[in-house]
Image (spheres, grey):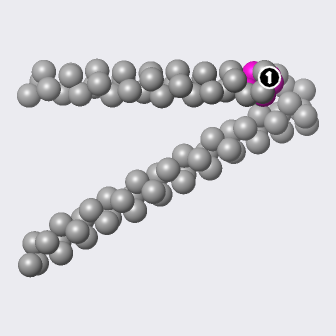
Amino acid sequence: MWADCVVSLVLLMLLVDIIALLIITILMIASCFFWERHVINNTSRPPLIRLKLFTRASGRPASVYAIGFISWMGLCRESHLVIIQMTD
């Protein structure tokens, strides 16, 4: 009985951590876009990435960039797991 409570508490804590990380990630991505917009409009420095790359063609390039990024992260994760398995 106590073991079930401990397991459910650990899973709940893990879920809360994952949700918190997702929220922080979304906030950081949004702050990056707002910073780039500030750099473009209020300074003479060139931006790191032009925001028009994401907004042209009704946002289709942004979805392609997102799919490419997610695919690349999946590949990096798999290669990391293979390296871990090979060292054990």
Q: Quadrant of the C terminus?
A: top left
Q: Main secondary structure of the magenta part?
A: helix
**The one of 41 and 2 positioned closer to us in this rendering:** 2
84 vs 21, left or right, is: left
Taking the spot 54% from the left edge, 52% from the top edge, the residue there is 24
Coordinates of residue 56 in the picture (x, y in percent): 80, 22
Displayed quadrant of residue 59: top right
Tag 1's secondary structure?
helix
Q: Is residue 33 above or below residue 72?
A: below
Please, what is the three-letter code of the amino acid marked with disc 1?
A: Arg
Q: Is residue 48 left or right of residue 39?
A: left
Q: Quadrant of residue 58?
A: top right
Q: Quadrant of residue 53?
A: top right
- Give the image location of residue 82, x and y in percent: 21, 22
**Magenta residue check for 84:** no
Q: Mark 1 = which residue?
A: 56
From the image, which quarter does the N terminus lie in? Answer: bottom left
Q: Image check: 46 left or right of 16? A: right
Asked if residue 9 is positioned above or below residue 18 in the image, the reply reads below
Residue 30 x, y percent position in the rendering: 68, 44
**Would residue 17 appear left or right of 79 to someone viewing this image?**
right
- Report the front residue among 65 and 28: 65
* Nearer-the-camera pick, 81 or 39: 81
The residue drawn where x is 29% and y is 24% is 78
The segment highlighted magenta reads 52-56
Q: How many marks?
A: 1
- Residue displayed at 18% across by 27% down: 84
Is any atom of residue 47 visible in this view? no
Which residue occupies the foreground of this view, 12 or 45? 12
